[in-house]
Amino acid sequence: DTEVTQTPKHLVMGMTNKKSLKCEQHMGHRAMYWYKQKAKKPPELMFVYSYEKLSINESVPSRFSPECPNSSLLNLHLHALQPEDSALYLCASSQGGTQNTEAFFGQGTRLTVV
Amino acid sequence: AQTVTQSQPEMSVQEAETVTLSCTYDTSESDYYLFWYKQPPSRQMILVIRQEAYKQQNATENRFSVNFQKAAKSFSLKISDSQLGDAAMYFCALNFGNEKLTFGTGTRLTIIP
């Protein structure tokens, strides 16, 4: 099973809403990632969890709040977003640690902020 | 800092023909991994091929192969017998065995029937 599952696939939210994006993997990977991707651009790293601890935060605004409940799950909590936050949000996972190589990606959540 | 450059924003190829996508990178490290990812309109980033820098032999996966020139810091992707399903955005990426992937800006590949 080389699958990373993201829900929902599409999300429309108002600027005052609170919503969450979910990501799940069952490959035994110990590193999980959130990326943001704008149209026709490469993914931009937002957060990395390594062994369930936040290891990288790429200076992401606090209206994005990640959570890693266990080694298989990763959430991204959204609150008071701006229209410019509309993008494709990709979750990924990799083996982690010193054996970290390729990342496996989910299909993404297309987020629209209105 | 490491950088990855894809100098071809768009490429097109006739179905069944061969196309090569270019990627150059800059790093002072000697051990690293290089990847090509494909992102079709379905949005999912799919790993196409990977190359370990310590391996001299070029990686091959079915119709996909790379030309890895470590001294020149070049990592091109050759797609043979192009198929309609190969149409996608292709990203070259660099990793040092840690948690950071550095992506190039991407090449949009169009397949002409």
Image (tube, rainbow, N blue to C red):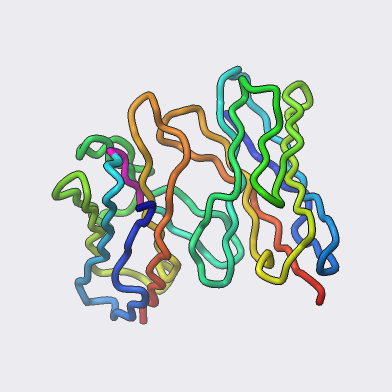
Tell me which corner region of the image, top left, top right, bottom left or bottom right, holds residue B2.
top right
- Looking at the image, residue A1 sits to the left or right of residue A17; the answer is right
Residue drawn 32% across the image and 64% down it: A6
**Above or below B61: residue A80:** below
Residue drawn 33% across the image and 81% down it: A12
- Looking at the image, residue A81 sits to the left or right of residue B66; the answer is left
- Rendered location of residue B73, percent (x, y): 73, 28
- Rendered location of residue A60, percent (x, y): 35, 50
Task: Depth check: give the residue in front, B78 or B102.
Answer: B78
Q: Residue furthest left?
A: A69
**Above or below A12: residue A66:** above
- Rendered location of residue A46, percent (x, y): 38, 49
Tell me which corner region of the image, top left, top right, bottom left or bottom right, holds residue A84.
bottom left
Quarter of the figure that contains the C terminus of chain A: bottom left
- Looking at the image, residue B47 sits to the left or right of residue A29; the answer is right
Task: Tell me the magenta residue range.
Answer: A30-34
- Rendered location of residue B85, percent (x, y): 66, 69
How many dots with numbers?
A: 0
Q: Is residue B32 magenta?
A: no
Residue drawn 50% across the image and 27% down it: B96
Task: Depth check: give the residue in front, A89 or A2.
Answer: A2
**Above or below A36: residue A104:** above
Task: Depth check: give the residue in front, B64 or B47.
Answer: B64
Residue drawn 34% across the image and 33% down it: A96
- Magenta region, main secondary structure: strand
Tell me which corner region of the image, top left, top right, bottom left or bottom right, holds residue B86.
bottom right
**Above or below B30: residue B81:** below
- Looking at the image, residue B63 sits to the left or right of residue B113; the answer is left
